[in-house]
Image (cartoon, rainbow, N blue to C red):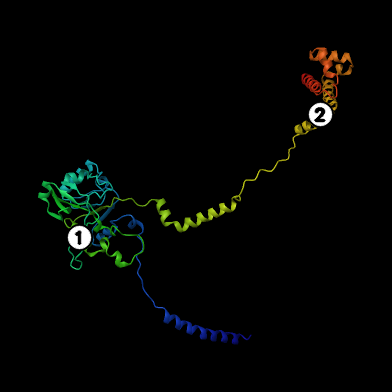
Amino acid sequence: MNPRLFWSLLLGALVLFGVPLTILFLRTHEKVTETVVLPPQGEASYNPLYVLGQALRADGIEVQSRQRLDLAQMPLAATDTLVLLQDTADMPPRTAQALLDWVDTGGHLLLRTQPPAEDDASSTQGPLLDRIGVDSLFHGSDCQPFHVVDDPSHVEFCGGRRFSLGFQANATAERRWGGNDGLVFARLPHGKGRIDVLADMDVMRGEGPNASTRRRPVDAVARDGLHDLSHRDLTRYLLDPNYGRGTVWLVYGSRPPSLGARIFYQGWPLWVPLLLAILGWLWSRAQRFGSALPAPVIERRSLLEHVRASGELLLRFGHGARLYQAVQALFLHRLRLRAPVAAALDGAARDQAIAAVLQWPVSRVTSALTPPSPHDSSALRERIRLLLQMRSLL
């Protein structure tokens, strides 16, 4: 075909079919922009105060994040703020007193009560809450109404444990927030500093207590944690005493996921195909399933078994004399090698010579060298036994 004609036909086909298809695609499809929030990665996946730290850094405040409270590695200054999300129920008394001494110099401590336990009888609150005047913890976790202009039914502190203050702490408290069933927030003066006790710190988290790692629309995430505008205002109020004066220490009290957990939950696109490949290879290499078959009989080629079978055959057909003659010939061959003088004799002289060599009675040697009756199997066995014994003694 002429190349010019070929390209002309190809161009015509493209115009004939391509233009209608393009018009149909543009008429039946619409460009849509969708924003999807991905699950948190890195430190944000295990540090619930990560978003708070980033927000404070964006505001020009120095922030330090720690997994656990370690006063030896945390040089707390008098103008610093410590947000203690870590549970303080099992805090050592010495550490609790060191924290109170630091607050006494002007520090600001924010801590929460012990989270609700599965066992309602458990009421351990730890030495730190005891020393600042928290009298008791309540097991109820009713939500506390929080006035918001555009959300009249807004509530907070739904997942924490309310508390009550002792007489002295209740008398000196600067701020109290709660109801008849307990307090959800109290600001207590301690020396030159302040201590804020909260029922929970969900308002400071990156996401709320019911946050999920699944992909969700933006408006759903915006109602959780610091994504909520009212939570930002409340967090700013809680951090107010030393805000902008020193370092903010965030102790989130949770452990990062282990390497095994990361491999299991995040590396499954790699290890699942490898596992299936290994299982398939094992399946292909495995034996067929079914009933167990007996092992094939191995061909027996032992010389002793052949000799024994030949002797049993000769005995069965009455040819025992041939067996005796074979054993006697074997004995005489050994005799010629070990005692040629005795082997050269014949008759009674040979018997006496053999008896002298073996130190046996002459009658026993004569009995062994005398052929038995063809049908006397017991005499045959006895003479063969004597000949073999005599041969072994030479």
Instruction: Tell me which corner region of the image, top left, top right, bottom left or bottom right, holds residue 233.
Output: bottom left
Q: Nearer the viewer, residue 383 or 60?
A: 383
Asked whether, in this view, residue 321 is left or right of residue 140, the answer is: right
Q: Residue 216 in the image: x percent, y percent?
A: 34, 65
Image location of residue 246, percent across then percent down: 20, 55
Q: Secondary structure at mark 2?
A: helix
Q: Is residue 363 above or below residue 46?
A: above
**Residue 234 visible to an observer of this rendering:** yes
Kindly identify the amino acid type of the residue bearing the numbered disc 1. Answer: Leu
Quadrant location of the C terminus?
A: top right
Label 2, residues with CA under 10 Å away: few <14, some 14-19, many ≥20: some
User: In which quadrant is the N terminus drawn?
Assistant: bottom right
Q: Residue furthest left?
A: 171
Mark 2 lies on residue = 315
> Can the viewer see residue 239?
no
Determine whether 233 is above or below 390 in the image.
Answer: below
**In the picture provided, is 372 more to the left or to the right than 38?**
right
**From the viewer's perspective, is 227 left or right of 288?**
left
In screen coordinates, is 327 left or right of 51?
Answer: right
Tell me which residue sits at (17%, 44%) in the image: 131
Residue 140, position as x, y percentages in the image? 22, 52
Q: Amino acid at mark 2?
A: Leu
- Mark 1, Cα crowd under 10 Å, few <14 / some 14-19 / many 20+, is some
Residue 383 lies, with reference to residue 66, above or below; the image says above
Outermost residue to the front: 375
Mark toward the viewer: 2 or 1: 2
Q: CA distance from mark 2 to mark 1?
A: 112 Å
The residue wearing badge 1 is 234
Marks 2 and 1, the one that precedes in the sequence: 1
Q: Position of residue 241 (x, y in %)?
A: 16, 56
Dot 2 and dot 1 residues touching (CB under 8 Å): no
Secondary structure beneath label 1: helix
